[in-house]
Amino acid sequence: MQHWVASDLGAKAAAGGWGNCLVAENEDKEVVGWVEVDAAQGTVVSLWVHPDYQHNAIGTALLLNAEAKLVEGGVQTPSALVATDNLGAFGFFNRLGWTVDDSAVVLVAVAPGVNLDHVKFVASNK
């Protein structure tokens, strides 16, 4: 896992070399957000921004850089799995032009014996 300051995400992603997780830090080097991808599936599997840092474009920067890296790796249409009860994430992905794949509601095992319904969002074909 690499740690990058949010304002430097674009340059770091463009330089290559990041694994499956991109981390944003504040000025004190504290992690304030991350995005994790499954490159083989072309899917964003986790995107999180600390509540104190939300609405500051960190999530947008993380997602856009993850999307660009997936496309650069040959993924035609990146996707993301979003828990059906995460209404804030629905708005976030919609604002960035991602749409719900109506054919895919996915049951995800989040812990032994615990499953959550997820909706698949897909990136717009720009």
Image (spheres, rainbow, N blue to C red):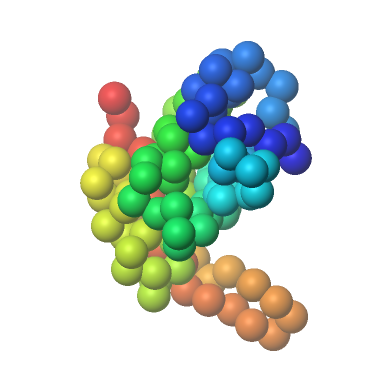
The residue depicted at 49 percent of the width and 29 percent of the height is 7
What x and y, as percent, mark residue 16? Answer: 65, 18
Residue 107 screen position, x and y as percent: 53, 71
Question: Taking the image as drawn, is residue 122 in sight?
Answer: no
62 or 84: which is nearer to us?
62
Residue 5 visible? The answer is yes
Q: Compared with residue 79, is residue 2 higher up or lower down, i.e. above or below?
A: above
Going 37% across and 45% down the picture, which residue do you hit? 56
Give the residue drawn at x 63%, y 14%: 15
Identify whether 1 is placed above or below 111: above
Q: Locate residue 108: give its quadrant.
A: bottom right
Where residue 98 appears, x then y in whole percent? Answer: 31, 44
**Location of residue 11 with respect to 33 vertically, above or below:** above
From the viewer's perspective, tell me whether residue 13 is left or right of residue 100.
right
Query: At 65% from the left edge and 48% from the top edge, which residue is drawn?
Result: 30
Q: Quadrant of the C terminus?
A: top left
Q: Count of labels shown?
A: 0
Q: Quadrant of residue 20?
A: top right
The answer to which of 4 and 113 lies nearer the viewer is 4
Q: Residue furthest front?
A: 28
Left-right relation of 60 to 39? left
Q: Name above or below for residue 11 compared with residue 103.
A: above
In the rendered image, the quadrant that contains the N terminus is top right
Q: Place residue 43 in its image quadrant.
A: top right
Taking the image as shown, residue 43 lies to the left or right of residue 22, namely left
Q: Residue furthest top?
A: 15
Q: Quick one: 55 or 65, which is closer to the camera? A: 55
Q: Position of residue 123 (x, y in %)?
A: 36, 39
